[in-house]
């Protein structure tokens, strides 16, 4: 399934059913009086968050979502049936914006938690039958109310992944390999840049049953905030992560400045949104299996001299992965207070 994280659709509630004009007609009761029933209420359009959904792909194929109209009232005081609500499931983390005629948009809902619901448009009220209008001066009203019209709204859906941890880094840093080692996620892994074109979610389950959701964000490059490479399409998903694991491949190290790769991505985060630059990060050097022992020892000493707490791992061979995972659990405990 192709990943889609934005869509524009139209939602429309159901119309209210019309009230009925009817008179009681029975043998030996020539003037039974009005007995028209009320029309049924139109259905609402309700959006509901679901954790199991990971994409807005279906909304690219269906652009209009309509609830059922209410049925008209009938004689003998029979009320019309209410229209069924239209319940639309979206991924947890979906923001819903109302699109105005002038091109502006207003945020009307942020569906974060599984099962969270919001009514976007309310069905029209059913019209009253003619029985409601009889009086001492009007014994036989020959009119009833029409049902209220439907409401409609054009909306834009935007998905921002909800994750405890966001894996961040340059293309081919080994993020997909790392998430496949610590969770049941099985993303595509290959030794070339931009293997990951869609965010991947993995769930890490601790010995005590705790869960940690990890998002593998596709690799970012210089100019990502302006749309270069995979661009800001995926920067939005970093916002929802509680903290970041920033992975740099040993292949991308510069001898004169080993930490330049980290700073490149951090600059892009800051240019996209200033607050992202201050989000907690665990710094990781991956693919240490490609380095000699002496070269690795020099790099570790450089980290100490620079006052940086860096984890050195080989996601492919599992070296150092347990220590990093333990640090991630500790950070979760700190955030949960």
Image: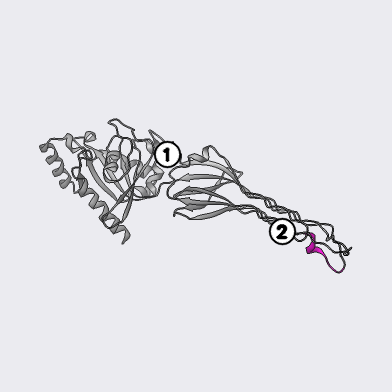
Please give the range of residues in magenta: 128-136
The residue sitting at 27% across, 46% down in the picture is 182
Classify 18 as above or below 259: below
Mark 2 neighbour class, 10 Å CA radius: few under 14, some 14 to 19, many 20 or more: many
For the residues labelled 2 and 1, the Cα–Cα distance comes to: 50 Å
Q: Quadrant of residue 285?
A: top left
Q: Quadrant of residue 9?
A: top right
Disc number placed over residue 79 in the picture, else none:
2
Image-based side of 295 in relation to 155, left or right: left
Quarter the N terminus occupies: top left
Q: Kindly state the secondary structure of the residue where label 1 is placed.
A: helix
Q: Position of residue 290 (x, y in %)?
A: 17, 34
Q: Nearer the viewer, mark 2 or mark 1?
A: 2
Q: Position of residue 52 (x, y in %)?
A: 42, 48
Q: Which residue is mark 1?
A: 233
Quarter the C terminus occupies: bottom left
The residue sitting at 15% across, 40% down in the picture is 299
Q: Quadrant of residue 292?
A: top left
Q: Is 121 or 67 nearer to us in this picture?
A: 67
The residue sitting at 21% across, 48% down in the picture is 322
Image-based side of 128 in relation to 179, left or right: right
Counting the numbered discs, the total is: 2
Q: Is 288 or 302 nearer to us in this picture?
A: 288
């Amino acid at each position: 399934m192709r990943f889609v994280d934005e869509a524009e659709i139209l939602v429309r509630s159901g119309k209210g059913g019309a009230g009925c004009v009817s008179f009681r007609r029975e043998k030996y009761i020539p003037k039974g009086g009005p007995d028209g029933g009320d029309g049924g209420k139109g259905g609402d359009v309700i959006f509901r968050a679901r954790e199991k959904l990971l994409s807005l792909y279906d909304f690219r194929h269906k652009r209009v979502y309509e609830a059922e109209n209410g049925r008209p009232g009938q004689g003998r005081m029979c009320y019309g049936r209410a229209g069924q609500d239209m319940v639309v499931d979206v991924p947890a983390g979906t923001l819903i914006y109302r699109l105005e005629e002038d091109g502006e948009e207003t945020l009307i809902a942020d569906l974060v938690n599984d099962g969270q619901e919001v009514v976007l448009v309310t069905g029209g009220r059913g019209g009253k039958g003619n029985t409601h209008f009889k009086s001492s001066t009007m014994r036989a009203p020959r009119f009833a109310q029409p049902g209220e019209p439907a409401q409609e709204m054009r909306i834009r859906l935007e998905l921002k992944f909800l994750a405890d941890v966001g894996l961040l880094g340059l293309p081919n840093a080994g993020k997909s390999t790392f998430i496949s080692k610590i969770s049941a996620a099985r993303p595509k892994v290959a030794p070339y840049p931009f293997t990951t074109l869609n965010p991947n979610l993995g769930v890490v389950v601790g010995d005590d049953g705790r869960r940690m959701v990890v998002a593998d964000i596709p690799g970012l490059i210089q100019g990502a905030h302006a749309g270069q490479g995979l661009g800001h399409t995926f920067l939005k998903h970093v916002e929802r992560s509680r903290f970041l694991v920033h992975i740099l491949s040993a292949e991308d190290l510069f001898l004169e400045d080993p930490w330049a790769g980290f700073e490149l991505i951090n600059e892009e985060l800051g240019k996209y949104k200033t607050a992202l630059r201050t989000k907690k990060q665990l710094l990781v050097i991956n693919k240490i299996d490609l380095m000699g022992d002496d070269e690795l020892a020099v790099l570790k000493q450089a980290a100490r001299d620079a006052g940086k707490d860096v984890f050195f791992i080989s996601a492919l061979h599992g070296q150092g992965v347990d220590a990093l995972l333990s640090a991630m659990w500790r950070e979760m405990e700190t955030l949960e207070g």
